Each structure stands twice: as structure tokens, then as C-alpha cells.
Image (tube, rainbow, N blue to C red):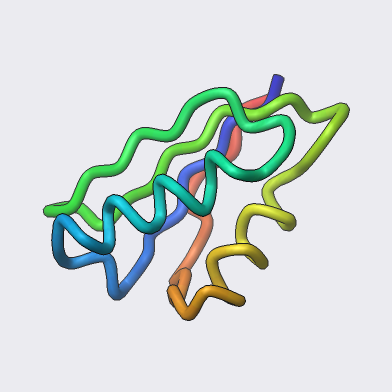
Amino acid sequence: MGETTFIVDDLVCRYCKDMVAKLVTSINGVSRVDINIPERTVNVAYDSRITDAYVIQMTLLKAGYKTIEEPRRVY
């Protein structure tokens, strides 16, 4: 299992939270998504044999969500 947290600069409202959750949970291998709007963080747990942090980040970027950084990754 892998886990990563992204800071998403434009995660500012409930609609954004719902859209990000829908996008990330649609990725094969993602098992959990926790989103904190005030901190603008998206924490994702995933099966590292199926996907990785790069795929998650690219999915967010393609949808128009700008990720500032990936502050921590847990393996």
C-alpha cells in the first residue's frame, strides 16, 4: 500500500472537494481519499502495485487542479 498527500492550491469549496474525490476514487487501485478544504490537502491511500502518486497527480492536473507539492509519501 502507498499513501500520499497533495496540497491542491485551488481546492476552496465543497464543489471542488466533491469533484476531486470523484476524480481520485475513479483511479483503479485507490482505496481511500481524505480531503481537508481549509488546509487544501488531499490524502490518498492506494495499492502501489496498481497505481502511484504520479498517476494521481496527473489526474488532478488534467482536470485543472493545480497541485503545489507532494509534502509526504508513506510506503
Left/right placement of residue 72 relative to residue 15 reads right
Left/right placement of residue 70 relative to residue 14 reads right
Residue 64 vertical placement versus 71 (above, below): below
Given residues 72 and 60, the one toward you in this image is: 60
Where does the image place residue 22, in percent across and percent down from the top left? 45, 48
Given residues 22 and 42, the one toward you in this image is: 22
Given residues 18 and 66, the one toward you in this image is: 18
Where does the image place residue 72, in percent across and percent down from the top left? 52, 43
Residue 47 vertical placement versus 7 (above, below): above
Left/right placement of residue 13 relative to residue 58 reads left
- At a point 73% along the width and 55% down the height, the residue shown is 55
Where does the image place residue 24, in percent across and percent down from the top left? 53, 47
Residue 37 vertical placement versus 51 (above, below): below
- At a point 58% along the width and 31% down the height, the residue shown is 3
Q: Residue furthest right?
A: 49
- At a point 79% along the width and 40% down the height, the residue shown is 51
- At a point 30% along the width and 51% down the height, the residue shown is 18
Residue 26 vertical placement versus 31 (above, below): below
Task: Check the picture and name the quadrant holding the N terminus.
Answer: top right
Where does the image place residue 43, in percent across and percent down from the top left? 43, 39
Given residues 20 and 72, the one toward you in this image is: 20
Task: Check the picture and name the quadrant holding the C terminus.
Answer: top right
Report the number of discs.
Answer: 0
Locate residue 15: give its quadrant: bottom left
Q: Residue furthest top?
A: 1
